Amino acid sequence: MEAPASISVLDKENIEQTPGFNLDDRLRTVPGFTLFRRSSSIVANPTTQGVSLRGIGSSGASRTLVLWDGIPINDPFGGWVYWTRFAPDELERVEVLRGASTAVFGDRAMSGAIALFSRPASVLRVNGSYEGGNNNSHELTGGFSQLWQHWAFSTRLRAATTDGYYIVPEYKRGPADTRAGVKFVATDLRLDYMGARDRIFLKFDLLAEERQNGTTLTTNSTGLGNVAAHYFRDDFTLLAYHTQEGFHASFSSVSADRKKETLSYNQGVPSESTGLAGMWAKHTTHWNALIGADYNRVEGYSTDSLFPTGKRFGGGILNQGGGFMQTDYRRGPLQLFAGAREHSSGFFSPSAGLTLGRKRIRGRGSVYRSLRTPTLNELYREFKTGNTDTLGNAALLPEKVFGAETGVDFVGENTRAGVTFYRNSLTDLITNVTLSSTPALILRQRQNAASALARGAEFNLRHTWHDLRAEFGYLFADSRVPTGERIAQTPRHQGSAQLIWSHGATLLSGGLRAVSSQFDDDKNVFLLPGYPTLQAVLRHRLTKSFSVSAAFENLLNRQYLTALTPTPNIGAPRLWRAGLRWDGSLKKTK
């Protein structure tokens, strides 16, 4: 993917070499990739699983668009991502594009976009795996695909359960605390037609998920279905999709000694989303152009049944759309990019960039302007985390960013390296503002901050020596409001290093991830110290299609904080899994 911005591409091999129950844990090796409050999607409430890149964002809503085979999969009501929907080992590759350097993706991609690509179908391929681990963890996956001359069919199933772990440290824990865990079933079906000029695929996926949120009375569950169609004819593309979802959650208050828990309210959030997009492309020897338009309608309502009595209701309908164009022109080693989007709100988003390559070195730069419209969740839904209550705000304005970046990439036979410097000027940033704070209750509300500045640098390096490969990534992000406070939930330093040895049928991978301190609140009162963790993966092929594996996360069992609500919350302890996998064709070879 040629672009004037920083892009990280993880192929199937990269994904398999990194441990992680869900994909979000594996993507933490990408500098700047974060979810709200450092928590893994194993135990995190779904509403906190939005993606942020490069230190933009301090709430659970995504500032990043996530696409699965070209279909947007951000939650229609709140923008977060259900990472349980897809099995990491069934992805062909993942592309992480930082910054709003293209006009194609629209207002959901203010800090960038992440594109997931499923494995293509092949002739009579069958795969299945089982993994078991500590904390009563079990995962079963299966899949089948068939490929004909003009048709292809594939289906996948993923089912898992884990008791998870305590999210409150032992010294603070009381009778109200339980393990936070998850059980879910996810499946998808895809049918492709590949004609001489016409191509179309139909896709359906389904998720049923239940979670225990760390105390006796707090749970949540989700039922989600999505159907999509993507049509291609020569240079014309048409996409349509519809998502239907039901989210249910319970919230409580816990006494300071963690002995007594009182139910506060039960919440139900039905929502649905319908989207359309059409694009026409023109390709010539020296230039390419893309013109298109898209539309998205979201409807959702949050209904709270209060205890001991009462009702609370909020929600509505959002209609968004826009027209866009993107073009590039190449002359020798120079390639120029330009794009523009007119949002239905009247906001104009231009972008421009260039790349200049000479032999193994490529320079690049881009400048852009974009926005993000507040979600129905931010506008209307109230929620609790521990004894922190966060209110919605129907008066929220869209967030806006004016950004620029420049960088250099080196691509050699055995070495790849890149460095990028960036600056994002933010206005009307939506953040959780503290209204009052007592030991019993912290009250916050989503509000527009006047402005903020996020700037920094990222660096990545990969080098290969025969069977050994080393990878290193680092991000420095200084994200602050004008009064000097750092944007909540944004560490200044993030880094990862990985060493992979692959020889014959055996693979060994070990890695280190490190995150510096960050603040849990807008006033910079609650400091979460930094921490490092170690990971490892072992995989060995017993036959061409049959393999065994073991994976370890937080190998040294390092305890680290993920939140102060004001009760301290902690991240994952040492986790391990081991399993068997079959992945091969039933077709007989001559």
Image (tube, rainbow, N blue to C red):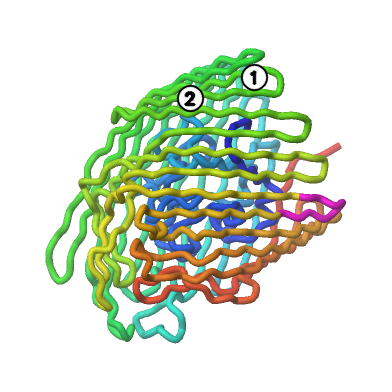
Q: Quadrant of the N terminus?
A: top right
State the residue at coordinates (40%, 68%).
212
In the depicted view, which residue is nearer to us: 570 or 224? 570
Crowdedness near tag 2: few (<14), some (14–19) or many (≥20) residues, C-alpha within 10 Å? many
Badge 1 or badge 2: first in the primary sequence: 1
Type of residue at label 1? Arg
Q: Which residue is mark 2?
A: 339
Type of residue at label 2? Gly
Q: Is residue 21 left or right of residue 450?
A: right
| 470 in magenta | yes
Q: Which residue is mark 1?
A: 330
Q: Quadrant of the C terminus?
A: top right
State the residue at coordinates (76%, 58%).
500
| 288 in magenta | no
- Figure check: 37 above or below 341: below
Q: Position of residue 108 (x, y in %)?
A: 41, 39
